[in-house]
Image (cartoon, rainbow, N blue to C red):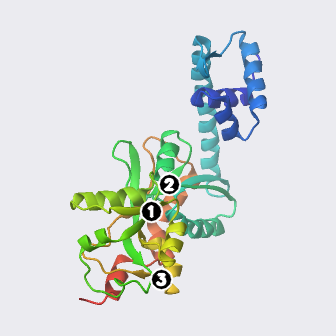
Amino acid sequence: MNLTLRQLTIFEAVARHLSFTRAASELHLTQPAVSMQVRQLEEGAGLPLFEQVGKRIFLTEAGQEMERYARSILGTLEEASLVFDEMRGLERGRLHIAVASTANYFVPQLLAEFCRRYPGVQVSLDVTNREGLLHALSDNDTDLVVMGKPPDDMDLVATIFMENPLVAIAPPAHPLSGQARIPLERLQQETFLVREKGSGTRSATERFFVERGLSLSSTMEMSSSEAIKQGVEAGLGLGLLSLHTLEMELELKRLVILDVVELPIVRNWYIMHRNGKRLSAVAQGFRAFVCEESAQMLNLPTLQRLQESIPAG
Ligand code: PGA
Protein backbone atom coordinates (compact mmCIF):
# COMPACT_ATOMS: atom_id res chain seq x y z
CA MET A 1 0.00 0.00 0.00
CA ASN A 2 1.31 3.38 -0.99
CA LEU A 3 0.83 6.04 1.66
CA THR A 4 2.71 8.96 3.14
CA LEU A 5 3.20 10.12 6.73
CA ARG A 6 1.57 13.40 5.81
CA GLN A 7 -1.58 11.56 4.74
CA LEU A 8 -1.58 9.58 7.99
CA THR A 9 -1.14 12.72 10.11
CA ILE A 10 -3.99 14.45 8.32
CA PHE A 11 -6.20 11.37 8.47
CA GLU A 12 -5.54 10.99 12.22
CA ALA A 13 -6.59 14.60 12.88
CA VAL A 14 -9.81 14.21 10.85
CA ALA A 15 -10.59 10.92 12.63
CA ARG A 16 -9.98 12.49 16.07
CA HIS A 17 -12.16 15.52 15.42
CA LEU A 18 -14.59 13.77 13.06
CA SER A 19 -14.44 17.03 11.14
CA PHE A 20 -12.47 18.13 8.08
CA THR A 21 -12.82 21.77 9.10
CA ARG A 22 -11.42 21.32 12.60
CA ALA A 23 -8.59 19.11 11.37
CA ALA A 24 -7.71 21.75 8.76
CA SER A 25 -7.61 24.49 11.37
CA GLU A 26 -5.50 22.40 13.78
CA LEU A 27 -2.98 21.64 11.03
CA HIS A 28 -3.10 25.15 9.54
CA LEU A 29 -4.23 23.78 6.17
CA THR A 30 -7.15 24.55 3.90
CA GLN A 31 -10.10 22.20 3.97
CA PRO A 32 -9.69 21.17 0.28
CA ALA A 33 -6.04 20.24 1.01
CA VAL A 34 -7.19 18.02 3.89
CA SER A 35 -9.94 16.39 1.80
CA MET A 36 -7.49 15.70 -1.03
CA GLN A 37 -4.98 13.96 1.23
CA VAL A 38 -7.73 11.82 2.78
CA ARG A 39 -9.03 10.93 -0.70
CA GLN A 40 -5.55 9.84 -1.77
CA LEU A 41 -5.25 7.69 1.35
CA GLU A 42 -8.62 6.11 0.55
CA GLU A 43 -7.41 5.39 -2.99
CA GLY A 44 -4.27 3.78 -1.57
CA ALA A 45 -6.34 1.63 0.80
CA GLY A 46 -8.88 0.86 -1.92
CA LEU A 47 -11.71 1.49 0.55
CA PRO A 48 -13.64 4.51 1.86
CA LEU A 49 -12.43 5.57 5.31
CA PHE A 50 -15.22 8.01 6.17
CA GLU A 51 -18.92 8.07 5.48
CA GLN A 52 -21.26 10.99 5.71
CA VAL A 53 -24.64 10.61 7.42
CA GLY A 54 -26.63 13.85 7.35
CA LYS A 55 -24.21 16.61 8.22
CA ARG A 56 -21.88 14.41 10.28
CA ILE A 57 -19.02 12.19 9.22
CA PHE A 58 -18.19 8.80 10.71
CA LEU A 59 -15.32 6.34 10.35
CA THR A 60 -16.13 3.29 8.26
CA GLU A 61 -14.92 -0.11 9.49
CA ALA A 62 -11.82 0.32 7.32
CA GLY A 63 -11.45 3.84 8.73
CA GLN A 64 -11.42 2.47 12.28
CA GLU A 65 -8.67 0.00 11.35
CA MET A 66 -6.71 2.77 9.64
CA GLU A 67 -7.08 4.96 12.74
CA ARG A 68 -5.58 2.23 14.92
CA TYR A 69 -2.58 1.84 12.62
CA ALA A 70 -2.16 5.59 12.15
CA ARG A 71 -2.07 6.15 15.93
CA SER A 72 0.41 3.38 16.45
CA ILE A 73 2.71 4.51 13.59
CA LEU A 74 2.60 8.19 14.62
CA GLY A 75 3.05 7.24 18.30
CA THR A 76 6.13 5.17 17.46
CA LEU A 77 7.58 8.07 15.49
CA GLU A 78 6.95 10.45 18.37
CA GLU A 79 8.67 8.05 20.72
CA ALA A 80 11.66 7.87 18.37
CA SER A 81 11.92 11.64 18.28
CA LEU A 82 11.78 11.74 22.10
CA VAL A 83 14.65 9.25 22.28
CA PHE A 84 16.75 11.51 20.04
CA ASP A 85 15.69 14.56 22.05
CA GLU A 86 16.88 12.81 25.18
CA MET A 87 20.21 12.01 23.54
CA ARG A 88 20.66 15.67 22.63
CA GLY A 89 19.73 16.71 26.20
CA LEU A 90 18.80 20.33 26.69
CA GLU A 91 20.88 21.60 23.81
CA ARG A 92 18.16 21.35 21.25
CA GLY A 93 14.51 20.44 21.32
CA ARG A 94 11.00 21.77 21.52
CA LEU A 95 8.95 22.74 24.52
CA HIS A 96 5.21 23.06 24.16
CA ILE A 97 3.50 24.50 27.18
CA ALA A 98 -0.04 25.70 27.82
CA VAL A 99 -0.79 28.09 30.66
CA ALA A 100 -3.82 29.68 32.30
CA SER A 101 -4.42 33.25 31.16
CA THR A 102 -3.76 34.31 34.75
CA ALA A 103 -0.39 32.55 34.75
CA ASN A 104 0.61 34.40 31.61
CA TYR A 105 1.50 37.35 33.85
CA PHE A 106 4.65 35.53 34.99
CA VAL A 107 5.31 32.48 32.79
CA PRO A 108 6.98 34.52 29.98
CA GLN A 109 9.63 35.63 32.49
CA LEU A 110 10.33 32.00 33.34
CA LEU A 111 10.54 31.08 29.67
CA ALA A 112 12.89 33.98 29.00
CA GLU A 113 15.30 32.81 31.69
CA PHE A 114 15.06 29.17 30.57
CA CYS A 115 15.77 30.16 26.94
CA ARG A 116 18.73 32.29 28.04
CA ARG A 117 20.21 29.20 29.67
CA TYR A 118 19.32 26.84 26.82
CA PRO A 119 19.31 28.94 23.64
CA GLY A 120 18.74 25.91 21.38
CA VAL A 121 15.29 25.25 22.83
CA GLN A 122 12.29 26.26 20.74
CA VAL A 123 9.27 27.21 22.76
CA SER A 124 5.63 27.30 21.87
CA LEU A 125 3.22 28.79 24.41
CA ASP A 126 -0.59 28.53 24.41
CA VAL A 127 -2.54 30.83 26.68
CA THR A 128 -6.13 29.93 27.51
CA ASN A 129 -8.47 29.56 30.45
CA ARG A 130 -8.83 26.54 32.69
CA GLU A 131 -11.38 24.84 30.47
CA GLY A 132 -9.09 25.16 27.42
CA LEU A 133 -6.23 23.68 29.44
CA LEU A 134 -8.31 20.67 30.46
CA HIS A 135 -8.98 20.02 26.75
CA ALA A 136 -5.27 20.36 25.94
CA LEU A 137 -4.49 17.80 28.66
CA SER A 138 -7.12 15.31 27.58
CA ASP A 139 -6.18 15.65 23.88
CA ASN A 140 -2.49 15.19 24.79
CA ASP A 141 -1.84 18.44 22.94
CA THR A 142 0.90 19.86 25.12
CA ASP A 143 3.95 18.81 27.16
CA LEU A 144 3.19 20.73 30.33
CA VAL A 145 0.37 22.83 31.75
CA VAL A 146 0.53 25.60 34.35
CA MET A 147 -2.72 26.35 36.16
CA GLY A 148 -4.55 26.37 39.50
CA LYS A 149 -5.94 23.28 41.21
CA PRO A 150 -5.72 20.15 39.03
CA PRO A 151 -9.05 18.47 38.29
CA ASP A 152 -9.90 15.44 40.46
CA ASP A 153 -11.07 13.28 37.58
CA MET A 154 -7.83 13.18 35.53
CA ASP A 155 -4.77 11.07 36.17
CA LEU A 156 -2.08 13.77 36.35
CA VAL A 157 1.34 14.36 37.83
CA ALA A 158 0.87 17.80 39.41
CA THR A 159 3.35 19.73 41.55
CA ILE A 160 2.79 22.98 43.45
CA PHE A 161 5.50 25.52 42.77
CA MET A 162 4.10 28.78 44.12
CA GLU A 163 1.15 30.18 46.07
CA ASN A 164 -1.59 32.01 44.15
CA PRO A 165 -3.66 34.27 46.43
CA LEU A 166 -6.91 35.72 45.07
CA VAL A 167 -7.62 39.18 46.47
CA ALA A 168 -10.50 41.67 46.35
CA ILE A 169 -9.65 44.87 44.49
CA ALA A 170 -11.22 48.32 44.33
CA PRO A 171 -10.33 51.76 42.96
CA PRO A 172 -8.56 53.90 45.63
CA ALA A 173 -11.56 56.23 45.95
CA HIS A 174 -14.02 53.42 46.79
CA PRO A 175 -15.73 53.78 50.22
CA LEU A 176 -14.42 50.36 51.30
CA SER A 177 -10.80 51.12 50.42
CA GLY A 178 -8.67 51.71 53.49
CA GLN A 179 -11.29 50.13 55.81
CA ALA A 180 -9.95 47.43 58.12
CA ARG A 181 -11.44 43.96 58.57
CA ILE A 182 -14.39 44.31 56.18
CA PRO A 183 -16.82 41.40 56.85
CA LEU A 184 -17.06 39.00 53.90
CA GLU A 185 -20.88 39.35 53.89
CA ARG A 186 -20.49 43.08 53.17
CA LEU A 187 -19.19 42.20 49.68
CA GLN A 188 -22.65 40.87 48.77
CA GLN A 189 -23.86 44.48 48.54
CA GLU A 190 -21.31 45.29 45.81
CA THR A 191 -21.28 44.66 42.07
CA PHE A 192 -18.42 42.34 41.06
CA LEU A 193 -16.72 42.04 37.70
CA VAL A 194 -16.15 38.31 37.21
CA ARG A 195 -14.28 36.21 34.67
CA GLU A 196 -16.02 34.13 32.01
CA LYS A 197 -17.36 30.59 32.63
CA GLY A 198 -14.48 28.12 32.22
CA SER A 199 -12.06 30.37 34.12
CA GLY A 200 -10.29 28.81 37.13
CA THR A 201 -10.36 32.15 38.97
CA ARG A 202 -14.12 32.25 38.58
CA SER A 203 -14.78 28.68 39.69
CA ALA A 204 -12.49 29.07 42.73
CA THR A 205 -14.27 32.28 43.71
CA GLU A 206 -17.74 30.77 43.29
CA ARG A 207 -16.73 27.70 45.32
CA PHE A 208 -15.33 29.91 48.09
CA PHE A 209 -18.56 31.87 48.51
CA VAL A 210 -20.86 28.83 48.20
CA GLU A 211 -18.87 27.01 50.90
CA ARG A 212 -19.63 29.93 53.22
CA GLY A 213 -23.33 30.07 52.35
CA LEU A 214 -22.85 33.38 50.49
CA SER A 215 -23.15 34.49 46.89
CA LEU A 216 -22.31 37.54 44.82
CA SER A 217 -25.68 38.57 43.50
CA SER A 218 -24.70 41.44 41.24
CA THR A 219 -22.04 40.46 38.71
CA MET A 220 -20.81 41.59 35.32
CA GLU A 221 -18.93 39.05 33.19
CA MET A 222 -15.63 39.91 31.46
CA SER A 223 -13.42 37.54 29.53
CA SER A 224 -9.99 38.62 30.81
CA SER A 225 -8.25 39.81 33.96
CA GLU A 226 -7.13 42.87 31.97
CA ALA A 227 -10.75 43.86 31.24
CA ILE A 228 -11.67 43.38 34.90
CA LYS A 229 -8.80 45.57 36.09
CA GLN A 230 -9.76 48.33 33.64
CA GLY A 231 -13.41 48.02 34.68
CA VAL A 232 -12.58 48.22 38.39
CA GLU A 233 -10.35 51.23 37.79
CA ALA A 234 -13.19 52.90 35.90
CA GLY A 235 -15.58 52.34 38.82
CA LEU A 236 -17.79 49.63 37.25
CA GLY A 237 -17.52 47.41 40.32
CA LEU A 238 -15.09 45.40 42.43
CA GLY A 239 -12.99 42.41 41.35
CA LEU A 240 -11.49 39.23 42.77
CA LEU A 241 -8.27 38.38 40.97
CA SER A 242 -4.98 36.61 41.41
CA LEU A 243 -2.46 38.84 43.15
CA HIS A 244 -0.07 37.92 40.35
CA THR A 245 -2.08 39.85 37.75
CA LEU A 246 -1.93 43.10 39.73
CA GLU A 247 1.71 43.99 40.16
CA MET A 248 1.66 47.10 37.98
CA GLU A 249 -1.69 48.52 39.09
CA LEU A 250 -0.77 48.14 42.78
CA GLU A 251 2.58 49.77 42.23
CA LEU A 252 1.03 52.69 40.36
CA LYS A 253 -1.70 52.88 43.02
CA ARG A 254 -4.44 52.59 40.43
CA LEU A 255 -6.05 49.79 42.42
CA VAL A 256 -6.04 48.82 46.08
CA ILE A 257 -6.48 45.49 47.83
CA LEU A 258 -9.39 45.43 50.25
CA ASP A 259 -8.79 44.10 53.76
CA VAL A 260 -11.63 41.58 53.87
CA VAL A 261 -11.96 39.01 56.66
CA GLU A 262 -11.25 35.49 55.27
CA LEU A 263 -9.58 36.87 52.14
CA PRO A 264 -7.34 36.26 50.28
CA ILE A 265 -8.60 33.00 48.85
CA VAL A 266 -5.54 30.80 49.18
CA ARG A 267 -4.75 28.90 45.99
CA ASN A 268 -1.58 27.48 44.47
CA TRP A 269 0.05 27.28 41.06
CA TYR A 270 0.70 23.80 39.73
CA ILE A 271 2.79 22.51 36.87
CA MET A 272 1.33 19.29 35.51
CA HIS A 273 1.29 16.65 32.80
CA ARG A 274 -0.63 13.47 32.20
CA ASN A 275 0.52 10.50 34.21
CA GLY A 276 2.32 8.09 31.87
CA LYS A 277 3.25 10.80 29.36
CA ARG A 278 6.85 10.50 28.36
CA LEU A 279 8.41 13.93 28.83
CA SER A 280 11.27 15.02 26.59
CA ALA A 281 14.55 16.09 28.20
CA VAL A 282 13.61 19.71 27.54
CA ALA A 283 10.18 19.32 29.18
CA GLN A 284 11.76 17.56 32.17
CA GLY A 285 14.33 20.35 32.41
CA PHE A 286 11.70 23.07 32.31
CA ARG A 287 9.57 21.28 34.90
CA ALA A 288 12.52 21.01 37.28
CA PHE A 289 13.46 24.66 36.65
CA VAL A 290 9.92 25.84 37.49
CA CYS A 291 9.64 23.67 40.62
CA GLU A 292 13.04 24.55 41.99
CA GLU A 293 13.63 28.15 40.99
CA SER A 294 10.51 30.03 39.93
CA ALA A 295 9.21 31.26 43.29
CA GLN A 296 12.57 32.80 44.13
CA MET A 297 13.33 34.07 40.65
CA LEU A 298 10.02 35.82 40.06
CA ASN A 299 9.87 37.70 43.34
CA LEU A 300 6.12 38.30 42.94
CA PRO A 301 4.02 39.78 45.74
CA THR A 302 3.40 37.04 48.31
CA LEU A 303 0.66 36.33 50.81
CA GLN A 304 3.04 37.02 53.66
CA ARG A 305 4.14 40.40 52.35
CA LEU A 306 0.53 41.23 51.57
CA GLN A 307 -0.55 40.49 55.15
CA GLU A 308 2.33 42.53 56.54
CA SER A 309 1.31 45.50 54.39
CA ILE A 310 -2.34 45.50 55.60
CA PRO A 311 -2.68 47.54 58.80
CA ALA A 312 -3.92 45.43 61.71
CA GLY A 313 -7.55 46.44 62.48
P1 PGA B 1 -7.93 31.30 34.74
O1 PGA B 1 -6.94 30.67 35.80
O2 PGA B 1 -8.64 30.18 34.00
O3 PGA B 1 -8.91 32.06 35.60
O4 PGA B 1 -7.08 32.21 33.91
C1 PGA B 1 -6.73 29.32 35.81
C2 PGA B 1 -6.62 28.72 37.15
O5 PGA B 1 -6.55 29.47 38.13
O6 PGA B 1 -6.63 27.50 37.15
Task: Tell me whether circle 3 and circle 1 mark residues in contact (CB < 8 Å).
Answer: no
Residue at figure coordinates x 44%, y 62% from the top left = 220
Q: Is residue 32 above or below residue 165?
A: above
Left or right, 143 with respect to 118, comes to left
Q: Residues within 10 Å of mark 3 (few under 14, many from 20)?
A: some
Q: Residues within 10 Å of mark 1 (few under 14, many from 20)?
A: some
Of mark 2 and mark 1, the one earlier in the sequence is 2
Of mark 3 and mark 2, the one earlier in the sequence is 2
User: Residue 71: percent from the left, percent from the top?
Assistant: 59, 27
Q: Give the CA distance from mark 3 to mark 2.
A: 24 Å
Residue at figure coordinates x 72%, y 23% from the top left = 38
Q: Is residue 48 above or below residue 220?
A: above
Q: Is residue 2 above or below residue 175?
A: above
- Where does the C terminus fall, quadrant-wise? bottom left
The amino acid marked with disc number 3 is Leu
The residue singled out by tag 3 in the image is 250
User: Residue 39: percent from the left, percent from the top?
Assistant: 75, 19
Of mark 3 and mark 1, the one earlier in the sequence is 1
Comparing 154 with 280, the one in front is 154
The amino acid marked with disc number 2 is Asn
Task: Name which quarter of the figure residue 154 lies in.
Answer: top left
Q: Is residue 168 above or below residue 155?
A: below
Q: Give the CA distance from mark 2 to mark 1.
A: 18 Å
The residue singled out by tag 1 in the image is 220
The residue singled out by tag 2 in the image is 129
